[in-house]
Image (cartoon, grey):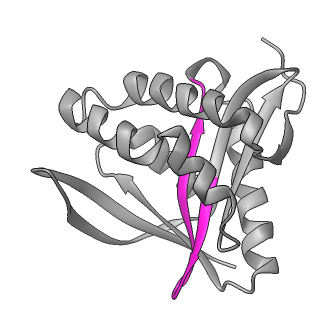
Amino acid sequence: MNDAQPSLQRLTAADVDAVSALARVVWLATYPSLISQAQIDAMLAGRYAPQRIREQLDDPRQAWWVAKRGHTLAGFAHAMLDESGCKLDKLYVHPDQQRHGIGIALEKTVEDWARRQRAGRVWLQVNRGNAQAIAAYRKYGFRIVESRVFDIGGGFVMDDHVMEHTL
């Protein structure tokens, strides 16, 4: 395993298809024990469609980053500004690349961006059953501030903790 520091950069249109494909790999490795395959498929189609990601690249209130090891996409993050600060909307690392500093590097990049945007906090939602992610976010300085069930339509819900990290 290559433990060299990953290179982080803003997502460009050239890497959108690779991000969409990596999202599928991570979701299929992470979520089958937490949510139904139908919900996984619906969320991947809705949140990771290449055209949707490309549209977000043009929005100054949103930002995407990728982490690469060599020429290989190892992870990605997406954040967006809202009325309460900066939402860390997506942070995923390839299962083979986890526990090598990629997640924290992406999270710190999001924090730096949020500070430059004058956000006072970074917040996120994480599935209550995703113990590995919850532990990682706690290590990054996040704390659980709320637990809720979010109706996302189509008969699906997200049973999440809301976590935040004050900047």
Viewer-nearest residue: 85 or 104? 85
What segment carries the magenta color? 78-94
Residue 103, compared with residue 97, is above or below; it is below
Can you see residue 101?
A: no
Residue 36 horizontal side relative to residue 105, left or right: left
Count of numbered circles on the image: 0
Residue 36 found in image quarter: top left
Residue 33 horizontal side relative to residue 142, left or right: left
- Is 87 colored magenta in this rendering? yes
Going 52% across and 88% down the picture, which residue do you hit?
A: 83
Quarter of the image with the C terminus in it: bottom right
- Is 29 colored magenta in this rendering? no
Residue 16 found in image quarter: top right
Residue 18: give x, y in percent of width and height.
Answer: 64, 27
Going 76% across and 34% down the picture, which residue do you hit?
A: 14
Residue 32: give x, y in percent of width and height.
Answer: 27, 26
Going 27% across and 39% down the picture, which residue do you hit?
A: 42
Residue 32 horizontal side relative to residue 66, left or right: left
Residue 123: give x, y in percent of width and height.
Answer: 52, 70
Going 88% across and 21% down the picture, which residue do you hit?
A: 70
